[in-house]
Amino acid sequence: MKILNFGSINKDFFYSVNDFVKPGETISSIRYNIKIGGKGLNQSVGISKAGQNIYHAGIINKDDTFILDMLKKWNINCENILLSNNPTGHAIIQVDKKGENSIIIHGGANHDVNIKFIKSVLSKFDSGDILVLQNEINNIKEIIDRAHHKKMKIVFNPAPFNYEILSYDLSKISTLILNQTEGEALSKKKKPDNILKVLNSRFNNTEIILTLGEKGSLYSFKDELLKIKAHKLNTVDTTGAGDAFFAAFISQLIWSENWSDDTLVTAAKFSNACGALVVQQKGAMSALPHSGAAQNFILGKKEHV
């Protein structure tokens, strides 16, 4: 069983400022930093750190091959990463003295995914392999349809949410992992129990994990509903907590040939622990934990990272 993450790769440009720039104003930044990210790449790094082999499919600019070097250091298979003339997806992020941020995102090469590329990537994977998807690249609907036809197990994180998601056939998804905001947008309901009731009736063969931040998460499949408590900790930075949860969940599923209820609940508990570890540190990718750190945390050992 192989894991394919068909997802985004971004360059994040961070500018530390005293105050956000105003219309018509030019200001100087205090510090400047470039980091590699994107929901797709964050999740691939998390899966790799959790001890699993991961294939990442995506597109970057032909002059940004340093990204490939970084991915290889994280033990991520790069054979399905295409080079483009278009700019790598990127974000311009202002961070003020209060720690608040203002972000502009450009999809760039993440939106160059065409049918030929999709066919080429999926031809290397078989029935029973796991496909990991987020919503930061284009042609998601086509990827879902073709992967489902190959009988791959599809795990989908509908983030960032947009209304194009409503055109996807989510009944083809094996496991749907989403937060409360995304759940509300899909179900038109506010309360978690009602969100799950609507989604279960609409996608009755899909396991659903609804993450609720500090309130933990809910696992639901058909008539079964289980609550998994969150760990109470001092929160430093919530950036990347959702990606850590998602990556940890995938890494646990790969150990089991049968996705039973017990397997999924165990995976969700492990994912909660990884999410808890991430919020205790600054940054997204650098805070993603190794599997040993998460296991130690679950066992109550003090050395978490």
Image (cartoon, rainbow, N blue to C red):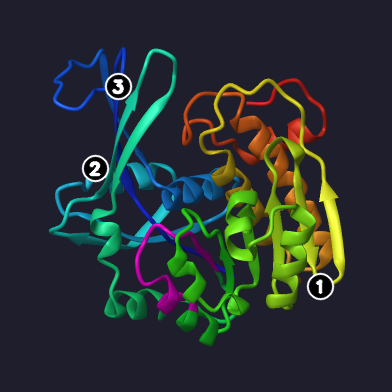
- Residue 229's place in the image compared with 133, above or below, is above
Q: Secondary structure at mark 1?
A: loop
Residue bounds of the magenta highlight: 131-144
Q: Secondary structure at mark 3?
A: loop
Q: CA distance from mark 1 to mark 2?
A: 45 Å
Let me know if residue 257 appears in the view: no
Query: Which amino acid lies under the numbered mark 1 shown in the image of this protein?
Result: Lys
Q: Is residue 63 left or right of residue 247?
A: left
The residue that disc 1 covers is: 222
Q: Quadrant of residue 225?
A: bottom right
Q: Which mark identifies residue 20?
A: 3
The residue that disc 2 covers is: 66
Other-residue count near label 3 (Cα within 10 Å), few / some / many at <14 / 14–19 / ≥20: some
Badge nearest the viewer, 1 or 3: 3
Q: Quadrant of the C terminus?
A: top right
* Residue drawn where x is 55% and y is 36% of the image: 288
- Residue 219's place in the image compared with 12, above or below, is below
Q: Secondary structure at mark 2?
A: helix
Report x, y in % for residue 87. Answer: 18, 51
| Near-viewer residue (68 or 174) | 174
Q: Quadrant of the N terminus?
A: bottom right
Q: Is residue 302 left or right of residue 63?
A: right
Magenta-colored stretch includes residue 136 = yes
Q: CA distance from mark 1 to mark 3?
A: 47 Å
Q: Are marks 1 and 2 in contact (CB under 8 Å)?
A: no
Query: Which amino acid lies under the numbered mark 2 shown in the image of this protein?
Result: Phe
Query: Which amino acid lies under the numbered mark 3 shown in the image of this protein?
Result: Phe
Q: Earlier in the sequence, mark 3 or mark 2?
A: 3
Magenta-colored stretch includes residue 272 = no
